[in-house]
Image: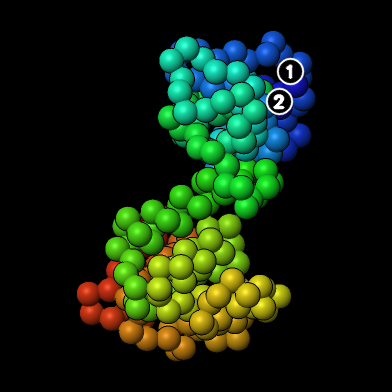
Amino acid sequence: MRAVIQNSVGGPDVLVVVNQPDSAPKAGEVLVRVKAAGINPVDGAVRAGYYPLLGEPPFILGWDISGTVEALGAGVSGFRIGDEVFGMPRFPKQAAAYAELAAVPANEIALKPKGADHLQAGALPLAGLTAWQGLARHGGLKPGQRVLVHAGAGGVGHLAVQIAKARGAYVVATASPAKLDFVRKLGADEVLDYTKADFTDQVRDIDLVLDPLGGDHAERSLKVLKRGGVLVSLLDVS
């Protein structure tokens, strides 16, 4: 099989395509023929050596994965050869997505939604789970709440807008001028052009803020929260 590996840390030029023996599923694993693999900021950070999650090179990058079941390891049930699946297996300790074949734990993938193609499914797991966990698990999102999503057109943000709307929230999102219409089409009730005015002057009485940006956005977001409101920052507030 072909795979993208890196033998050292650095820029994109350290990634090379090589031929390797085909992966084979162990007990409890599924062999997936990869159709699409997502690229997230964490991939770039690991590649550059900022987050040594995978130890020292060489290694294969990539966690978000979508593809078809090629083979089943011993003891695997719930999947059949040819099933379309997706997931984020072994995050963050082991990656395998940047290859034609990936042997992954059966309990860390799921059947791909029929309404999504492989490109969509391959881009969904990390950003989608981040948005869901931030809003629902950590933020305690409830119907009728007023939610502010920073970077509403970003990888996490555009999914957070849709999740919050689907859960019955009133959604305010920030975006650049070029992305305002895109975020409106996602369902946001209000879209703020962050280049024209400070969001702290435009909104109040927010129940929940999701901040994927970090920096001073988190601290400034405290000003728009109502008493008892929740701020979920994906980066260190300090």
Q: Quadrant of residue 184?
A: bottom right
Residue 192 spot, x, y in % from top left: 55, 82
Residue plotted at (57% across, 47% down): 113
| For the residues bearing labels 1 and 2, Cβ distance under 8 angstroms | yes
Residue plotted at (51% across, 66% down): 162
Judge left or right: residue 139 versus residue 183.
Answer: left
Picture disc at residue 100: 2
Residue plotted at (71% across, 25% down): 100
Quarter of the figure with the C terminus: bottom left
Quarter of the figure with the N terminus: top right
Residue at far left of view: 228
Residue at far bottom of view: 201
Of 137 and 81, which appears nearest the observer?
81
Q: Secondary structure at mark 1?
A: loop
Q: Is residue 46 visible?
A: no
Q: Secondary structure at mark 2?
A: loop
Residue 123 spot, x, y in % from top left: 62, 47
Q: Amino acid at mark 1?
A: Met
Residue plotted at (72% across, 30% down): 15
Q: Residues within 10 Å of mark 2 (few under 14, many from 20)?
A: many
Judge left or right: residue 189 versus residue 60.
Answer: left
Of 232 and 35, which appears nearest the observer?
35
Circle 1 residue: 1
Residue 112 spot, x, y in % from top left: 57, 42
In this rendering, the answer to whether 151 lies above or below 50 is below
| Cα separation between marks 1 and 2 | 6 Å
In this rendering, the answer to whether 168 lies above or below 37 is below
Residue 204 spot, x, y in % from top left: 37, 86
Q: Amino acid at mark 2?
A: Glu
Judge left or right: residue 152 versus residue 18.
Answer: left
Q: Is residue 2 visible?
A: yes
